[in-house]
């Protein structure tokens, strides 16, 4: 018994010492981690400083001369002035099989943060930063932006631009860049929306459409990891950037098989450009948005949308005016790009509960018939030429905002509804004078179909009013559409 008490007594004396040793060990390791973190941050900051100094040094050399050429015109899609009406007496023949197709590969998901800072608990401290407020499409944004970063170009010569680049690369810009990337993530901005954010910030800080604002935009894009160049046209600075697709009606420089589109001007003619990469891993901007930007909500007028055949599919709601303004200025591009963004969370919150309730317990075929009738009959039809006076594809949210929609607008919307609510594979179809969709059902269905990549897809035409899935409008029965994979 005495030996047991003696053992526990000695144990009680040793435990505090061991606990203290462990605490000292933890403190030592924490200090080592902090020193390592600080060294990583310092190395990163030193690397960026050296990279910007070298870039600015090359910028002083004479820039190359390029020719800014006219942009490719928007393809005009001849469309019927009226939608097609289903005639129940018309037979449903099969389409020619197989049908030629032009696949559009699925793009790799865009990383939300193009530039990755060191993987440490917090960035290195940045001296004398202050909060700066600006708005982007009605959305209030706050960034760390010191007044000392303001500058005025004495001219737009190579030397003046080089000096201004070095000025922008001061330590204060680290906090600004971090905040811009943070806003990109918080607002779920695609590449064009991120450019718009930097444009609005720069013009608020340095003046609308000024050379200083343009240089700041190019600087922040380059620091964010994008492939971007600075140019000089008629004494004014111009930004240039390549995209992963064609931007219609926007001037560009063709260089080694790549189009560098002008940012801030759309005039042809000779221009000088500093054609040097800022980093080895430059990222090309994408025209495909992973989702709609989360701009502040400003309600438009309420509108009612109702299926003629299934009146229970009826919903009344508004759209976001700020998002509509952003979409209105979006670059004109290939119509398939408009599917990728999907619907905004605000529209989904109003629309999807009604549609889900209407298709609950239904087979794939019956559910798809309900969805396609909703798209066919809840909207009034007009061609782009009649509504806008020019060719324009609508994002899905815009179809609920504008009074009219045409075939490609309905194809975009229906493809999103099928994907989100039914989880089925859907492709887009392009006829010489029409746009539609086709869906791969896992249930038995008879009708107009074709085989694509080993799967059977049935025609689903959101503009063939009153037609069920599997029905093809008579005028397109003998035509072979191009198939675009989503």
Image (cartoon, rainbow, N blue to C red):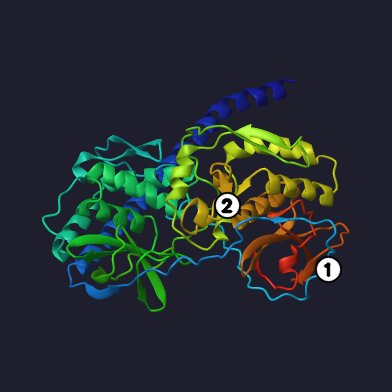
Q: Is residue 168 left or right of residue 70?
A: left
- Quarter holding the C terminus is bottom right
Residue 151 visible? The answer is yes
Residue in the image at 75% along x and 55% along y: 424
Can you say whether 203 is above or below 280 in the image? above
Residue 38 visible? The answer is no
Residue in the image at 17% along x and 65% along y: 158
Query: Looking at this view, is 108 or 76 the one in front?
Result: 76
- Residue 473, percent across and down? 74, 62
- Which of the two marks, 2 or 1, is nearer to us in this view? 2
- Figure quadrant of residue 164: bottom left
- Figure quadrant of residue 270: bottom left
- Residue 431, percent across and down? 64, 68
- Figure quadrant of residue 272: bottom left
Residue in the image at 55% along x and 65% along y: 77
Location of mark 1 (residue): 93
- Quarter holding the N terminus is top right
Residue at mark 2 to residue at mark 1: CA–CA distance: 28 Å
Q: Residues within 10 Å of mark 2 (few under 14, many from 20)?
A: some
Q: Is residue 298 left or right of residue 421?
A: left
Location of mark 2 (residue): 382
- Residue 218, percent across and down? 30, 57
Can you say whether 17 is above or below 158 in the image? above
Query: Looking at this view, is 426 or 368 the one in front?
Result: 368
Query: Looking at this view, is 269 or 242 the one in front?
Result: 269
């Amino acid at each position: 018994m005495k030996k047991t008490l003696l053992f526990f007594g000695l144990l009680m004396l040793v435990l505090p010492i061991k606990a203290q040793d462990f605490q000292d060990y933890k403190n030592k390791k924490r200090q080592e981690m902090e020193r390592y973190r600080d060294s990583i941050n310092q190395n990163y900051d030193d690397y960026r400083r050296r990279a910007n100094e070298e870039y600015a040094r090359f910028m002083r050399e004479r820039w190359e001369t390029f020719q800014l050429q006219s942009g490719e015109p928007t393809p005009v899609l001849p469309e019927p002035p009226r939608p097609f009406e289903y005639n129940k007496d018309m037979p449903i023949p099969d389409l020619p099989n197989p049908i030629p197709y032009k696949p559009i590969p699925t793009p790799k998901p865009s990383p939300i943060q193009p530039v990755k800072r060191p993987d440490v608990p917090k960035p290195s401290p940045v001296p004398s930063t202050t909060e700066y407020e600006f708005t982007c499409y009605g959305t209030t944004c706050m960034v760390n932006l010191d007044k000392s970063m303001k500058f005025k170009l004495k001219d737009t010569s190579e030397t003046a631009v080089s000096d201004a680049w070095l000025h922008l690369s001061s330590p204060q810009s680290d906090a600004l860049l971090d905040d811009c990337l943070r806003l990109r993530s918080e607002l779920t901005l695609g590449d064009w929306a991120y450019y718009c954010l930097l444009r609005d910030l720069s013009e608020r800080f340095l003046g609308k459409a000024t050379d200083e604002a343009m240089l700041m935009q190019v600087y922040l894009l380059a620091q964010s990891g994008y492939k971007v160049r600075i140019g000089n046209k008629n004494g004014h600075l111009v930004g240039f950037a390549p995209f992963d697709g064609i931007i219609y009606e926007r001037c560009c420089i063709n260089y080694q098989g790549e189009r560098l589109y002008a940012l801030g001007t759309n005039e042809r003619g000779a221009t000088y450009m500093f054609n040097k990469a800022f980093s080895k891993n430059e990222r090309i901007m994408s025209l495909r948005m992973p989702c709609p930007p989360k701009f502040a909500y400003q309600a438009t007028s309420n509108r009612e949308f109702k299926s003629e055949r299934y009146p229970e599919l009826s919903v009344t709601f508004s759209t976001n005016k700020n998002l509509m303004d952003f979409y209105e200025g979006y670059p004109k591009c290939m119509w398939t790009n408009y599917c990728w963004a999907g619907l905004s969370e605000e529209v989904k919150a109003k629309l999807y509960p009604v549609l889900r309730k209407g298709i609950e317990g239904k087979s794939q075929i019956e559910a798809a018939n309900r969805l396609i009738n909703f798209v066919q009959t809840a909207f009034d039809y007009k061609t782009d030429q009649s509504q806008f006076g020019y060719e324009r594809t609508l994002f899905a949210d815009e179809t609920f905002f504008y009074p009219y929609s045409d075939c490609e607008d309905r194809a975009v919307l229906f493809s999103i509804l099928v994907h989100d609510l039914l989880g089925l594979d859907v492709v887009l179809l392009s006829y010489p004078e029409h746009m539609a969709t086709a869906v791969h059902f896992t249930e038995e269905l008879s009708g107009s179909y074709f085989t694509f990549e080993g799967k059977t897809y049935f025609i689903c035409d959101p503009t063939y009013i009153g037609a069920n899935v599997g029905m093809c409008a008579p005028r397109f029965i003998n035509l072979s559409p191009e198939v675009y994979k989503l």
